[in-house]
Amino acid sequence: MSTEKPRILTGDTPTGVLHLGHYVGSLENRVHLQDEYDCYFIIANVHALTTRSDKTEEVRTDTLEITKDWLSVGMDPAKSTFFLQSEVPAIAELTWYFAMLLGYGRLMKNPTIKEEIRVKRLTDQYSFGFLMYAVGQIADILAFKPACVPVGEDQVPHIEMTREIARRFNQTYCGVKGGVADEDHVAKGGVFPVPEAKIGRIARLTGTDGTNKMSKSLGNAILLSDTAKQVQKKCNKIFTGRGSIDDPAPLEGNTVLEYLHIFHDDPDRAAQIQEDYARSKIGDGDLKKEVGQAINRFLDPIRDRRATITDDDAMDVLKTGTAKANKIAEATLYQAKQAMSYDFFPRNLSL
Ligand code: ATP
Ligand code: MG
C-alpha cells in the first residue's frame, strides 16, 4: 500500500489581496489539511491578467502580498508547496491539450464565467484569455493530480468542468471505458484522477455591499491586511435596511449579522447581541461596533504574524516551492504526452 499522502491543489489569483471570504471559504481548510495532505498552493498570476493585463507591476506586488497573507494565516511552507503559475511551463502546455477537449458551448454555459462577466462588467469586451483562464485552471489542478480541491462555492462549476476533462482525457487517450466510476479512473489506467471540490466552512461570504460575494475585484472586501480602523469603517458602511433603532428591519439578509455569527469568538454572546438587536435594545451603530471589534480580534494574530514577514521571505518561499512544483507538473505532462503518443523525446527543464 502506498504511504504517500493524497494531494491537494488550490490557490488564489493576484487580482488584489486576500479577504475574509478567502479565509472562511478556503484558507482555513488549507491550514487544517496541511498535515493530512501533500498540499500544493498556486498563485495564479497568469490568470490575474484576465482583468489586469495593463497592470503587471500591481500583479507582481499582489503576488508577494498574497504569499504574505498565506504565511500570516498559518499556511506553512515547511509542510506545503507554494508556487507561481507563470514559472511552471507544463501548466501552459496542458492548457492547450485540455482546450481541445472542451467544447466552446460547454465553457460558455459555466455559470461562474457568466456571473464574472456580469459582476465585473466585462460585457462582450473580455479578452480571449479570459475564456482561456477557465481551461488554464483545469490544467493548474490536473498537473498536480490532486484528490481534492478546497474552494468556495463559486468555484464548484470550474471543478465540475475539471472532472469532465479528466474523464474525457482518460477515456480518449488512456483506454478508460465510459462506465468506469470516478474513483477508479487511475486504477483503470487513466493519467488523471477525477478530483473532488471541498467546500469551506462558509461556502459564500457576502461582501460589504450586502449583495455580491465578497470579492477582491469588486471593492466590497474586508482584507486580512486591513488596519483595525479600516475594518471598523467598512463595517459602519454596511447597509442593513434599518432606519432607526425602532425600525423592525428583517434580520434575514443582514450582512452585519452574518459576520457577527461567523467571526465572533463567543457564540452565546453573538446570539445575545442578535437578540438585543432584534428587540431594538441596540441599534445599527452598536451592532456594527461589536462586529468590527469581533473581526479585529480575529485578525489581530494574523496582523502580528504578517508584521514579521518580508518581501524576501515571500520570494524565497515561492522560489523553493516553484522548483518542486515544476518536477511534479513536468512528470504529469510527460505521462499525458505518452498517453497521447506525443512523447517524441524526453526533456529536462529546470529553473
Ligand atoms: P476575483 O474578484 O478577482 O475573482 P475573488 O475574491 O473571487 O477574486 P479568487 O482568487 O477568485 O478570489 O478565489 C480564491 C478562492 O477563494 C476560491 O476558492 C474561491 O472560491 C474562494 N472565495 C473567494 N471569495 C469567496 C467568498 N466570498 N466566500 C467564500 N469563498 C470565497
Ligand atoms: Mg473569483
Image (cartoon, helix red, strand yellow):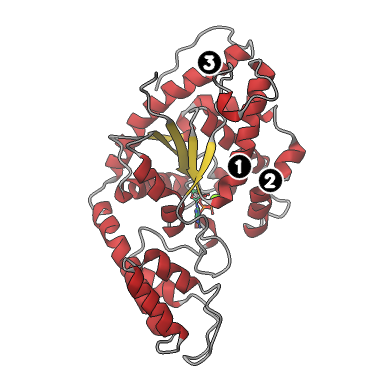
Name the foreground residue: 205 vs 306.
205
Distance from label 1 to label 3 (Cα)?
24 Å
Q: Nearer the viewer, mark 2 or mark 3?
A: 2
Query: Which element is circle 1 on?
Result: helix
Left/right of residue 91 with respect to residue 298 in the rendered view: right
2 and 1 marks in contact (CB < 8 Å): yes
Distance from label 2 to label 1 (Cα)?
7 Å
- Say if residue 209 shows up in the picture: yes
Q: Which residue is mark 3?
A: 334
Please state which amino acid type lies under the numbered disc 2. Answer: Asn
Label 2 neighbourhood size at 10 Å, few (<14), some (14-19), many (20+)?
some
For marks 2 and 1, the one nearer the N-term is: 2
Name the foreground residue: 183 vs 191.
183
Q: Which residue sits at x=39%, y=30%?
A: 322
Q: Which residue is mark 1?
A: 158
- Say if residue 44 shows up in the picture: no
Left/right of residue 161 with respect to residue 262 in the rendered view: right
Q: Which residue is mark 2?
A: 110
Please state which amino acid type lies under the numbered disc 1. Answer: His
